[in-house]
Image: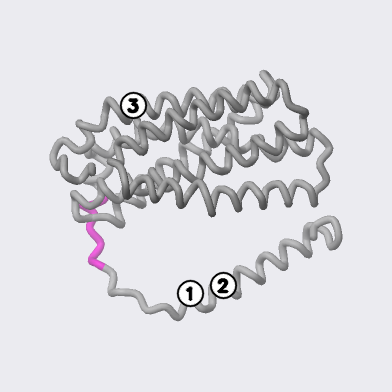
Amino acid sequence: MIERVGWSAALLVLAGIMVLITVPLLRIAEPAPAPLSRRAALTVATDGQTWLVIAALTPATFGLATAFAMTQPRLIDLGFSLTSIGIVAAIGNLVAATLAGPATGWLATRFQLRHVIAGGAVAIAGTFTALIAFDRFSGDWLGAFTAVIVVFSAICALGVASNTLFLGVAGQRGAAATDVTFFSAIMSLVALAGFMSSGFIASAAGYGATLGIAAAGAMLTGIAAALLWPRIFASNPDASQ
């Protein structure tokens, strides 16, 4: 669409679609909001349990954000057309949303969340390590295309696992909305740091370096999740299941 009608028209179409989606959402009845509690906000921000969760998830979040930010610039450098980039991104999102995300959710219902997060992070690290090796021996086109699918899928899987963990922790304290919002905000800042540093890393060491950082970050999260899990759910071990 962008190649045919230009950026301005494409953005206007996107804005129109968002308006159409928003209209029916405004008609959905919501429950009455609970009274605002400053104490709840202060509790989540000062609770050591909160920062253990953030410490465990930060390495993978930063690493995957670094790799994600450079997937499409790499396609541009390889000479992909805007149409081709859109198709590749669509395939990556399709695989992530229909396979990686649901599979992670299914695993979270069949196994302990600790094992899903720790084992999944280690599996992501192994996948990215294999991707780096594959990228060296495959053609540029195939390597870049595969990287998009792997990175998008890993981010979706981490998102599902992270939100499941956020809800599990929040359920112990009776302020789920405050807790989940705080967790999401902090992890968004972590991802933003990854986005901001990705260009410097890629220009200094190449696109492969961003994949290496993603692999290292995921491995650190796997180790941290395994080591910190008993302390995260020390007050309520049953909630960690």
Marks 1 and 2 in Cβ contact (< 8 Å): yes
Does dot 2 land on a helix, a strand or a loop?
helix
Residue beneath the point at 35% across and 24% down: 223
Q: Nearer the viewer, residue 177 or 61?
A: 61
Residue furthest to the left in view is: 235
Residue furthest to the front in view is: 110
Q: Which residue is label 2 attached to?
A: 21
Q: Residues within 10 Å of mark 1 (few under 14, many from 20)?
A: few
Mark 1 or mark 3, which is nearer to you?
A: 3
- Image mark for residue 224: 3
Q: Nearer the viewer, residue 110 or 65?
A: 110
Cα–Cα gap, marks 3 and 2: 40 Å
Whether 231 is among the magenta residues is: no
Residue 194 in the image: state x and y as whole percent.
54, 33
Residue beneath the point at 23% across and 44% down: 241
Coloring applied to the structure: one colour
Marks 3 and 2 in Cβ contact (< 8 Å): no
Label 1 vs 3, first from the N-terminus? 1
Q: Nearer the viewer, residue 148 or 231?
A: 148
Residue beneath the point at 28% across and 42% down: 45
Span shown in magenta: 34-41
Q: Residues within 10 Å of mark 2 (few under 14, many from 20)?
A: few
Marks 1 and 3 in Cβ contact (< 8 Å): no
Residue 178 in the image: state x and y as whole percent.
30, 54
Whether 39 is among the magenta residues is: yes
Q: Which residue is label 1 attached to?
A: 25
Q: Quadrant of the N terminus?
A: bottom right
Cα–Cα gap, marks 1 and 2: 7 Å
Does dot 3 land on a helix, a strand or a loop?
helix
